[in-house]
Image (cartoon, coloured by chain):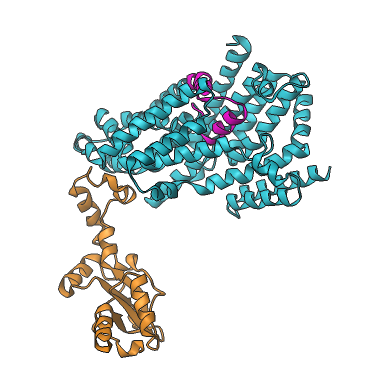
Amino acid sequence: MKVKDLISTRYISILPDMTVSELMRKYQETHKNLCHVIDREGLFLGYVKLIDIVKSSIPIYVEMDESLAGVVNESSMLEVWQKVRNLPVSKFITNKNEFLDKDDSLIKATIMLISHNQESVAVVSEKKLIGEVNLQSILELINKLF
Amino acid sequence: MLNLVVSTAIFVVAYIIIVTERIHKTVVVLVGAGLILLFNILTQNEAFFSDVYGIDYNVIFLLIGMMIIVSIMKRTGIFQFLTIWSAQKAKGDPLKILIALSLITAVLSAFLDNVTMIILIAPVTFLIADRLRLDPVPFLITEVIASNIGGTATIIGDPPNIMVGSKALLGFNDFIINLAPLIIVILAVFIIVIRYAFRKSFKVEEDLKKEIMSLKASESIENPKLLTISLIILGLVMVGFVVGNFFDYKPATIAIIGAGLLLLFSRDEPTKALLDIEWNTIFFFIGLFIIVGGMVKSGVIKMLADGVINLTGGNILITSVIVLWISAIFSALIDNVPYTAAMIPLVIEIGRHIMPAGASYAEIVQNPTIMPLWWALALGACLGGNGTIIGASANVIMVGISERAGYKITFMRFLKYGLPITGISVFISMIYLLLRYFVFKF
């Protein structure tokens, strides 16, 4: 069983100059937790995860010492968020080298999803994004097979 | 003679590599220690079990014991609470907060590891500076300087003191009696200096001060039960350090008992606390003790001691002043732990020259004549760490944390604060040593 057998083309791709607030609207519309970032030629640049965006709204001192979370009120988080929302999503790109080839095995795809704790992994051919493998499609396939 | 050359070469090469930071210092000393054993400069038996040449387990277990205690205590949130509480007592006034945080850091650093203290206080400092819309860097730099000053006051405050205390058979009380009064004076002068230096630096609107007052300090206490247990056991450990002196219980024994009790009563998985032990530091000490032991056995240290005595004519006053300033300069530029490790046997050798042949180890190291040398070494090695950004581990950690938060501290910016304070504090120490041990002799 290969990646090409379970590849999905229903993924979200965004451009790196999109702002965080635009991205947040996209997340709300699609209910996804991860986007694939591509440039204007369709070359794969990496991922932007919703969790990283949320994490960036936490003041640095709380990130360093979680016991301070109860000391401050939400206004400190909102202040940080005001700065974050206008940043380009390129600031939050991660795992740019973590993607699958359409000939990779099912087990490699599964391990990659688990080890990066992602709901989907990009499938790239000649550096261009051609689709994704997600947890849902793997579960459906396993269910069908066994 | 061959052993003398080889052991010196191993020490010098290790030292150079440590200074250049090309390879991790723990790896360097472990390879060096391996070579000392390979060339049979020390036998394995001597390295592991000799009181004179081998690993100093008093230092190792005192460090491990205190690291376990601090690992559990830092989870209680007490340090964060104290810091916010003091900022509120200062009514949000930045200059008063700067002084209060410096004092808290200094006092706590006398009983806790300086690096841990900085890791704990830095996030709260960012919080306070953020609420006041101020640059946190002056706060961070004064805190780390205060931490290095405060750590000099006790045997457990800074690694050089632990090492000196162990080899010179000096206990917790000896450090308190001999160094704490001086550190109080240095701290007072430090506060006066920063009060003057920053008197016009901070302008904060009243509304922002109110934000400090609105912080919920008590929310930082995450586990009140663990806090109570920790405070009781830490209190007992401190009493143990003082009382243990009279019953010949060394600080390492007290620290290990305290760590065991805290692990028992906290009912926490020991793995977390044991993983928090800075094993890099522990193995750095182990390797270093073996390398220095090799130098002692091969006669290098004796040769150096002869040289120092020839240079100073055996005058302990001059030797003390030289040891103080040289230690401060070296400690400002390089890691003070290997420096102290190399200097301790040198002081012992000077002591041996003074005492008649056949004197016991205790008589040599406890000879009142050489006591000023021990204090000069401890003061120079600890206070010198404030000289530069790389002078102490706490400085390096503070700079790293600051950079992570987006505030880069340059070498020169730190030097502007650190160098004058080091000069002043070492000068005061010199006057203190001269007056206390050579003029009034008490």
Q: In the rendered structure, which segment of residues is drawn in magenta?
A: B154-182
Q: B33 or B432: which is nearer to us?
A: B33
Answer whether residue B360 is visible to the viewer in this image: yes
Secondary structure that dominates the magenta span: helix
Q: Is residue B177 magenta?
A: yes
Relative depth, front residue between A146 and B177: A146
Residue at image position (60%, 44%) is B286
Chain painted orange: A
Residue drawn at x 63%, y 50% is B30
Instruction: Give the vertical position of B19 relative to B73 (above or below).
Output: below
| B351 and B193: which is toward the camera | B351
Q: Is residue B238 magenta?
A: no
In the drawing, does residue B48 fall left or right of residue B404?
Answer: right
The quadrant in which the N terminus of chain B is found is top right
Task: Work out whether A61 lies above or below B180.
Answer: below
* Chain in cyan (letter): B
